[in-house]
Amino acid sequence: MTQLMGVVNVTPDSFSDGGLYLDPEAAIAHGRELAEEGAEVLDVGGESTRPGAEAVSVEEELRRVVPVVEGLRELEARVSVDTSKAPVAAAALDAGAEIVNDVTGLRGDPEMAALCAERGCGVVLMHMLGTPRTMQDNPRYDDVVAEVRAFLTERLEAAVAAGIPEEGIWLDPGIGFGKTLAHNTELLRRLGELRELGRPLVVGTSRKSFIGRLDGSPASERLGGTIASSLLAATNGAEVLRVHDVAAVQQALAVAAAILG
Ligand code: HH2
């Protein structure tokens, strides 16, 4: 069964929902709603990673994330923290998070791998070319799938070598992180090649700009493209879909499962 990871952005500047849930009460209410709609994981983030986003201080990220993780901890859904800063991950784990979703694949903070090993938490390792400030400046690959696969192989080995339990590691090709439309669609088409790494795949296409590149739609009008790409990612082997619109994607998955039998 495909699991849904519902996005809870506690930021003023996320690309599709920035500012909507900056107040902790609003973010907690939103997380509860996503859990009721069927999210098995709630991904709480306090720093936008959209192209060109400004970095956020540890103090500010802690202020945004910790109360929201605390407010969601008693739900059945597991909480992940979307951060690349070890002090933020540590505080979120103390507050009840069980998974660290690090878009830098544990490269952003030298303390992160040891922290995750010590806590024995789940970890999402994601591929990104460059940094959020630079990643969309003309990204190039000879073979995007082979290069993402090599990167994820190396990060998986590094994480295990650092003492992180392999059974808690999920891998993510990082849709939109240093990729053109053609790179994103090729990764989604050839996702099966990443399944060979033997770990569950997380895929996040939700509302991303490659959808808008196809039809000119703004982030607020990309639900159709989110559903199409999420269903195809699930068909091609994604086990976890990171989405903002949990109810709609859950319904699409149920219909697809009923038809496919
Ligand atoms: N995408 C975003 C953020 N975190 N984490 C994983 N593992 N995979 C993703 O594809 C992914 C992610 C970007 O989406 P969003 O959180 O909505 O935007 P922003 O970074 O602007 O807050």
Image (cartoon, rainbow, N blue to C red):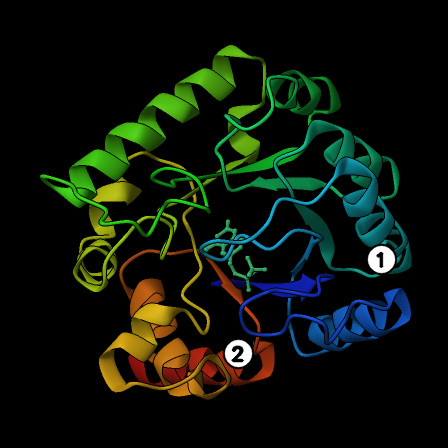
Q: Residue 256 appears at what percent x and percent y?
A: 36, 81
Q: Which residue is mark 2?
A: 250
The residue nearer to you, when weighing 82 against 212, is 212
10 Å neighbourhood of mark 1: few (<14), some, or many (≥20)? many
The vertical placement of 216 against 42, above or below, is: below
Q: Residue 64 appears at what percent x and percent y?
A: 82, 53
Quarter of the view holding residue 223: bottom left
Q: Which mark is residue 146?
A: none
Q: Residue 56 appears at what percent x and percent y?
A: 69, 45
Residue at the spot x=30%, y=69% of the render? 210
Q: Secondary structure at mark 2?
A: helix
Q: Is mark 2 within 8 Å of ligand 1?
A: no
The vertical placement of 21 against 140, above or below, is: below
Q: Which mark is residue 68?
A: 1
Residue at the spot x=58%, y=76% of the render? 246
Residue at the spot x=86%, y=48% of the render? 63
Quarter of the view holding residue 156: top left
The vertical placement of 198 against 159, above or below, is: below
Q: Which kind of residue does numbered mark 2 sit on?
A: Gln
The vertical placement of 145 against 252, above or below, is: above
The residue nearer to you, when weighing 21 against 38, is 21
First-in-chain label (2 vs 1): 1
Q: Residue 169 appears at what percent x and percent y?
A: 52, 34
Quadrant holding the C terminus? bottom left
Q: Residue furthest left?
A: 142
Residue at the spot x=30%, y=85% of the render? 216
The residue nearer to you, when weighing 158 against 19, is 19
Q: Which kind of residue does numbered mark 1 sit on?
A: Val
Quarter of the view holding residue 27: bottom right
- In the shown orientation, is residue 85 left or right of residue 158? right
Q: Secondary structure at mark 1?
A: helix
Quote the CA–CA distance across marks 2 and 1.
24 Å
